[in-house]
Amino acid sequence: QVQLQQWGAGLLKPSETLSLTCAVSGGSFNGYYWTWIRQSPGGGLEWIGEISHSERPNYNPSLKDRVTLSVDTSKNHFFLRMTSLTAADTGVYFCARPRRNYGSGNDGYNVWGQGTMVAVSS
Amino acid sequence: ETVMTQSPNSLAVSLGERATINCKASQSILYTSNDKNYLAWYQQKPGQPPKLLIYWASTRESGVPDRFSGSGSGTDFTLTISSLQAEDVAVYFCQQYYSTPRTFGQGTKVEIK
């Protein structure tokens, strides 16, 4: 059974850089679009982007200039880096995996990390 | 970007009664080549990540009780809980996976009346 375990710094100052890691265990790493999604304090969900071991990442245009996704296939880890943080970036950040691999087409997310609370404050 | 709009924002339903949540996409999310609607529904309880309930607009994820059902096509979709149970108190989200960026509805909070 696939599990995602995520971690990273939770309290940051404006203009700093967020770095999160998501570790994949119990299943295949290759062939999936590994995804980051965040949830604002008000509850709304925002898709940040997705990356696979071999495809170019896809980013939300609203965050594209500040976000970099990457993978380490040797460790089955994938990463989120977000620069120039502001208070608007405060929220819970989730890593997630679609139900099917990308060869089968787009799909909903049936595997999620536990979430990382990120607070941006001076 | 496809905007997903849910209604209502919240609803209170008596135990055993029906709960209905609507979701409208700003453009069609029906892929005509395979006749599938690229829509998912999630349930989220406090302190937990969202849980996938339904995909392809109407297919229940394994282990999801059959009191949850999804319907609709094109731009208009519905999630129905046929007989509300106490454990169904949660926030429900729709999400389109037809195009990027993937987008979510704003959520509907379901409570017991």
Image (cartoon, helix red, strand yellow):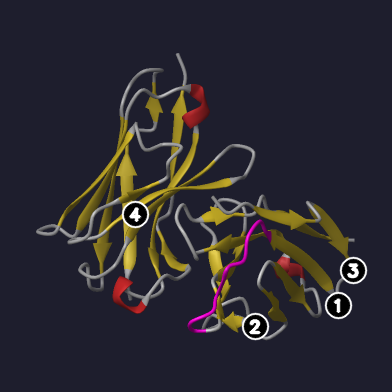
Circle 3 chain: B
Q: Residue at x 33, y 66 (%)?
A: A3
Q: Secondary structure at mark 3?
A: loop
Q: Residue at x 81, y 69 (%)?
A: B20
Q: Magenta includes A78?
A: no
Q: Point out which mark residue A50 bears.
A: 4
* The N terminus of chain A - image quarter: bottom left
**Alpha-carbon neighbours of circle 4 within 10 Å: few (<14), some, or many (≥20)?**
many
Residue kind at label 2, given as amino acid type = Pro
**Alpha-carbon neighbours of circle 2 within 10 Å: few (<14), some, or many (≥20)?**
few
Circle 1 chain: B
Q: Point out which mark residue B65 bears.
A: 2
Q: Residue B18: horizontal and vertical position, in percent?
A: 85, 75
Say which residue label 3 marks.
B14
Say which residue label 1 marks.
B16
Horizontal placement of B93 versus A79: left or right? Answer: right
